[in-house]
Image: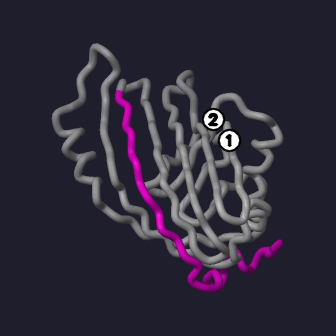
Amino acid sequence: MRRTLPFIAVAVIGAASIAPAVVATQASEPTLAKKMGLKPGQWRTVLRVTDAEITARPGESVPADAEPALRKLIGSTTETYECIGWQQPAGSALTLPGIKIDAACTFEELVADGRTLKIKGRCGSPSEGFHADMKVQAEHDDVEMTASVETIAFSEGVGLGTTVVATTTSSHVGPCPAGGPEAGKNIN
């Protein structure tokens, strides 16, 4: 099963108890982008990691090199480009500026309007050996979006959990590149 870990790839997550109507929203990224009033096309995002920590399950310890390696992420930035507002094939990831949520993830909460976006979700489950919970709080207009993203992931197999907090700053930069999603149907 494919896993997408949130934000360094800027992504993801849903939640445990879900209403089917909320889950259905995930499959329709163009509809959500339209509800948010986001301008269709290519968006540039800069993600900055603001905090990161690793913890071990009780009775286990964090490998000596793991915490320093994770702490090195703090202050780092990643730049991404996403095409927003285009019809995607069924089962595709939900893609918004600076946020990509795997289609297998579920939502506990997904609230969006012309100014704000709030997501709480989960990918995976403890019974599958891995789960990641995500919270996103964003403010936006039609061509800019800023977000705070927190992801808490835990791997049962190694008994380690990570918490990563990041901020994203996204802006519309123009049409999608030739051969990209603009060849699809723009529903906005």
Query: Callout 1: 10 Å neighbours few (<14), some, many (20+)?
Result: some
Q: How crowded is mark 2: few (under 14 residues within 10 Å), some or many (20 or more)?
A: many
Q: Which residue is labeled 2 in the image?
A: 15
Residue 21: x %, y % from top left? 83, 42
**Left or right of 147, for residue 71:** left
Q: Name above or below for residue 20 compared with residue 117.
A: above
Q: Are marks 1 and 2 in contact (CB under 8 Å)?
A: yes
Q: Is residue 173 left or right of residue 64?
A: right
Q: Which residue is drawn at 60% across and 51% down?
A: 101
In terms of sequence position, does the residue under pointer 1 or pointer 2 come before the other? 2
The residues colored magenta run 160-188
- Circle on res. 109: 1
Disc 1 residue type (three-letter): Glu
Residue at coordinates 48% horizontally, 54% vertically from top-left? 148
Residue nearest the observer in this picture, 73 or 124: 73
Q: Is residue 36 left or right of residue 80?
A: right
